Image (cartoon, helix red, strand yellow):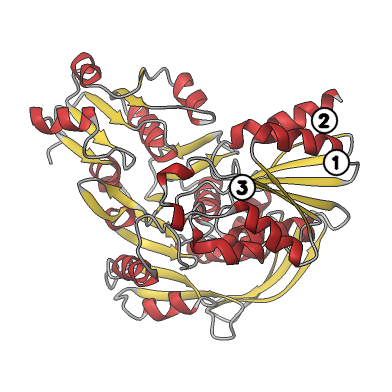
Amino acid sequence: MHTHGIKKIYLMGIGGIAMGTLAGMLAEKGFQVTGSDQNLYPPMSTHLEQLRIPIFTGYGAENLEQAAPDLVVIGNVIRRDNPEALHVVQRGLPYLSMPQAIGEFFLDRHQSMVVAGTHGKSTTASLLAWILSHAGLDPSAFIGAFVKNWQSSYRLGTGPYMVIEGDEYDTAFFDKGPKFLHYRPSIGIVTSIEYDHADIFPDFAAVIDAFGRFMQLFGPQSHLIVNADDPNCIALARQCNGRVMTYGYSCDADWRILDINHRPGEIFFRYQDPQLNRHDMVTRLAGDHNLMNTMAVIAAASLAGLTPNRTQEAILAFAGVTRRQDVIGESRGILVVDDFAHHPTAVRETISAMRLHFPERRIIAVFEPRTNSSRRRVFQNAYARSFQDAACVLIKEPPGLESILPQERLDARRMVQDIRRAKQEAHYFENTANLLQFLLGYCRTGDLVLCMSNGSFDGLPSELYQAIQEQ
């Protein structure tokens, strides 16, 4: 489409992290941005307030009449029967999906570096964008989380690269293909491929198909960096026409991790590059999964011409990502950590990372299954095996179960019983208020409370921290 002459852009579903990020980027580019959403919560609500972007609460045709936009961007939470979507279609207003808008407004000036995979996308994309900016390459970035060094989920730069978090979730009601198919990658990373998003992928074959289509986007001059230890990544990479590089522990990996040493608060590791040179590195990101994410970034940074020394400096200056092993604070010797983990693998890896990073602490794992997949029975048995490194497990009843067929629902009480059968302490809670009261009576000096949810968890991490301070 021709974007010439467009001044006013309206975003439907502006409160989501991706849509809110796009809103910020468009506003910074000089467009007049407005939008609508059902319910907004921090950090995105605060971010949009600071940008002074006017937002309509709730959806209605009258919002669009009032805003009179030249273009509408429709988020993937918007259904076909949404009153604003109906108005757009009936009036013939120009509209795009969020990934199409990224392509139209930002990708013509940049080579795109796309980070995809079931796990670790936000951390990997953030670290890569940070390393490029730290080295003076002035990248643009579009990330599904807030990068703490910038207090923002995006960056508009004038350099050659744009780092994009490439999501396999569907694009919009009018485009059921994955978002990452729109991003024209010249350098790509695939961290891992597992079954997720049970609401849109009927089976694992559909997930494999989506990632296969992503890998087929690469031309002969482009580079695809994949996890050498993930058989699904390796099998699919054979379909790629680009130059494939691998990273991991495998003796076949081009970028090979040779040995690691977990110490309190940091990881020392040695790796070998494709030219068989060996390098020592330190990272403060916790866990084996983050070491893998870091290795993928080291490979991508080398393609952008960065030396290991420049990369190491930037890794040590990286402050992390909001809601990814995010330390809320410590009071009375109790450390409160907030994390986005929701898939069973992510839950297991995050708890393991905390155990290695804080070896002296007793870990209390607090989990709210909230995604469309985690509220379904598909992961019921896998969850019971995901909490082994925790001293105590607290599970909250998932919200919004009524939207899922009874026979497909996750049973949180049964999850707790299964964890107890493995001789672990576990408790079930109907609501966040009861859970908070339990924690305040249960926690003691030296504990680490790890809160895991992909939603706001009703503000539990910060409320808990405040309540401990006040006790």
Comparing labels 3 and 1, the label whose residue is closer to the camera: 1
Q: Quadrant of residue 252?
A: bottom right
Q: Position of residue 434 (x, y in %)?
A: 72, 34
Please state which of residues 241 and 169 is positioned toward the viewer in this rendering.
169
Between marks 3 and 2 in the image, the one whose residue lies nearer the viewer: 2
- Determine the residue positioned at 45% across, 69% down: 225
Please, what secondary structure does the residue beneath circle 2 have? helix
Any mark on residue 324, and which? 3
Q: Are marks 1 and 2 in contact (CB under 8 Å)?
A: yes
Q: Secondary structure at mark 1?
A: loop
Q: Amino acid at mark 1?
A: Cys
Sooner in the amino-acid sequence: mark 1 or mark 2: 1
The residue under the point 26% across, 37% down is 74
Q: CA distance from mark 3 to mark 2?
A: 22 Å
Is the residue 449 above or below the residue 344 in the image? above
Q: Residues within 10 Å of mark 1 (few under 14, many from 20)?
A: some
| Residue 55, placed above or below residue 24 | above
Q: Earlier in the sequence, mark 3 or mark 2?
A: 3
- The location of residue 59, given as percent across then percent down, is 29, 24
Measured Cα–Cα span from mark 1 to mark 2: 9 Å
The tag on residue 367 is: none
